Image: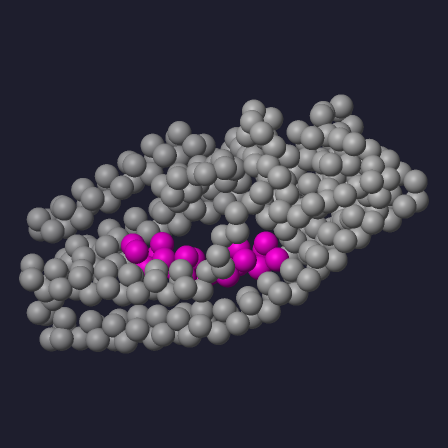
Amino acid sequence: MSPAAIAALAAAALAAGVLLIVTGLVGTRRPAAPPAATPSRLAAIVGIGVSSRQRRSRQALIALAVAATAGVWLLTGWPVGGLIAGLAVLGMPWLFTVGSAERQMIDRLEAVETWTRRLKDLVRTGHGLISAIVTSARTAPPGIVDEVAELAAELQTGTDPQRALDRFADQLADFKADEVIAALKLHAGDRGQRLSDVLDSVAGAAAKEVVMRRGVAAKRAEPRFVTRFMTALIAIVLIVMFSNGAYAQPYGDVVGQLVLFAATLLLVGMLVWIRRLTQPPQRRRFLGSADDAHNGPVATPPQEVMLR
């Protein structure tokens, strides 16, 4: 067996060992823990702090990337070629799912707006806040049905409404949804008489925010499509060109591998830069996490909400 083949097998065995260690530590069958407030990038990649389904898919993706790296390295004898293959496997979901998180947040905010209007109707019919939330869990929109059901269960077990609402806000993790939850928290604290009017107001603001976000997301879709198309075209051209042995021969030595590695870094850097340009800005929430809210001063909403 050639030295290159032995080195490729050693690298594949090392990567497989690391994957097995991570799988052993994280597990694949235990219930998913609530996602951490600020998970590290490495933990997110290997599936720590995410749902069981996401964890399994990410671990499978890592295993496929390791197999692609070892396979291409063995077939071509190019370590950089194997690295490119592994990066391509890892980068495909990253490139082609850009925008999915934004769409999910928009759909969730729309569900919050629908739930707020239903809550307003229940309050107007004479339900108290706790009773209205528990009743609304039966007809909660699909986008937030699990979160509302968990909130209702906590309230039914006698959990402090302020703490339960803070956890609900952490699950939604949206600055606009914080406005709805802030109104509920204020009412839970002072029992004002105008909760339905406030809910109607914040629901209208949420609806306008949804319309605005959908318009911005539609404008971002065009450059994202162009980026995907150009990346796929570049990949096809490179595969065809490097399938020609005479053309690929200069890249087989050390200098050629370094040039190929540098070109790959430039392409990846360009894709990262374009992706950042098309990502929505992160709006800072004004409600802190559930732990911070009950261990320190309560944040003040950006706009005054009067319930009396």
Query: With respect to residue 186, does 270 lie above or below?
Result: below
Q: Identify whether 247 is placed above or below 270.
A: below
Residue 41: where, in percent of width, then height? 38, 43
Q: Is residue 136 visible?
A: no
Is 55 within the magenta? Answer: no
Vertical order, 100 against 42 (above or below): below
Residue 268, x across and y down, in percent: 29, 61
Near-viewer residue (13 or 133):
133
Could you say which is closer to the camera, residue 162 or residue 134?
162
Q: Is residue 4 visible?
A: yes
Q: Looking at the picture, tell me which residue is in the foreground, 294 or 138.
A: 294
- Please state, as top left, top right, bottom left or bottom right, where the C terminus lies in the image: top right
Please tell me whether residue 214 is drawn above or below residue 149 in the rendered image.
below
Over which residues does the magenta segment extend?
86-106
For residue 157, side relative to residue 92 (left or right): right
* Dominant secondary-structure state across the stretch colored magenta: helix
Q: How is the image coloured?
A: one colour
Left or right: 194 as drawn, with respect to 219: right
Image quadrant assignment for residue 213: bottom right
Residue 153 location, x and y as percent?
74, 31
Q: Is residue 296 left or right of residue 127?
A: left
